[in-house]
Image (cartoon, rainbow, N blue to C red):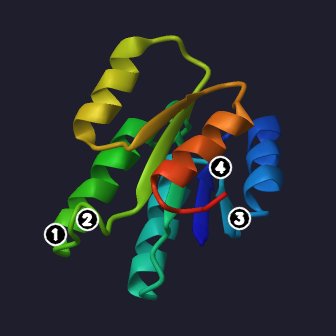
Amino acid sequence: MRILIAEDDLTSRKFLFKFLSQYGECDLVVDGLEALDAFMMAMKEQAPYDLICLDIMMPKVDGVKVLKAIRDLEKQRGILPDKRSKIIMTTALAETQYVQNAFDIGCDAYAAKPIDTQKLIDVMTKFGLISI
C-alpha cells in the first residue's frame, strides 16, 4: 500500500509515519503544496496513493483545499469513486464545520488528534486497505 502523510506538526508526522509504516510505503510532506506535488507525481508515475492522511490546518495550502484539488484531479482523469485514493482528514480542531466541509468535498474519514490507532485500523479495514 502507498501512503501519503501530509502533516506540518513534527510529533504527529513522526507518530503517523511510525504507525503506518507497518502497513505500507509512506511518503511525508509538511505543507499543502508538497502534498499536491506528491499526489501529482504519484499519478504521473501511475502509482497513486492508496491512503492519504491530510491535516486540515497546514501552511501554504490548507488540507481542505488540497482535498478539493485531489478530488478534482481524480475526476478529470476519470477515476471512479471506488478507485480513488482514500483520504482521512486529521485535525486537532473541534471545529465541526471544517470536518463537514471536508466530507462534502469528498474525504472518506476523519481522525481527531491525538490519533486513536485502533480507530485508524478500523477505518483502513473498512476501506479494504488492510485485513486483520
Q: Residue at x 48, y 83 (%)?
A: 47
* Residue that mark 1 sits on: 76
Tell me the CA gap for discs 2 and 3. Answer: 26 Å
Left or right of 89 in this view: 114? right
Q: Tell which of 6 and 16 is nearer to you.
A: 16
Left or right of 127 in this view: 8? right
Tell me the CA gap for discs 4 and 3. Answer: 21 Å
The secondary structure type at the circle numbered 4 is loop
Tell me the CA gap for discs 1 and 3. Answer: 29 Å
Q: Is residue 37 visible?
A: yes
Q: Earlier in the sequence, mark 4 or mark 2?
A: 4
* Residue that mark 2 sits on: 73
Counting from the top left corner in percent of width and height, residue 85 is at: 40, 62
Left or right of 45 in this view: 18? right
Counting from the top left corner in percent of width and height, residue 64 is at: 38, 37
Q: Earlier in the sequence, mark 2 or mark 3?
A: 3
Counting from the top left corner in percent of width and height, residue 122 is at: 59, 42
Q: Nearer the viewer, mark 2 or mark 3?
A: 3
In the image, what residue type sits under mark 4? Val
Q: Earlier in the sequence, mark 4 or mark 3?
A: 3
Q: Which mark is residue 23?
A: 3
Image quarter of the N terminus = bottom right
Counting from the top left corner in percent of width and height, residue 36 is at: 44, 60
Q: Nearer the viewer, mark 1 or mark 3?
A: 3
The secondary structure type at the circle numbered 3 is loop
Relative height, residue 122 to residue 96 (above, below): below
In the image, what residue type sits under mark 2? Leu
The secondary structure type at the circle numbered 2 is helix
Q: Earlier in the sequence, mark 1 or mark 3?
A: 3
* Residue that mark 4 sits on: 30
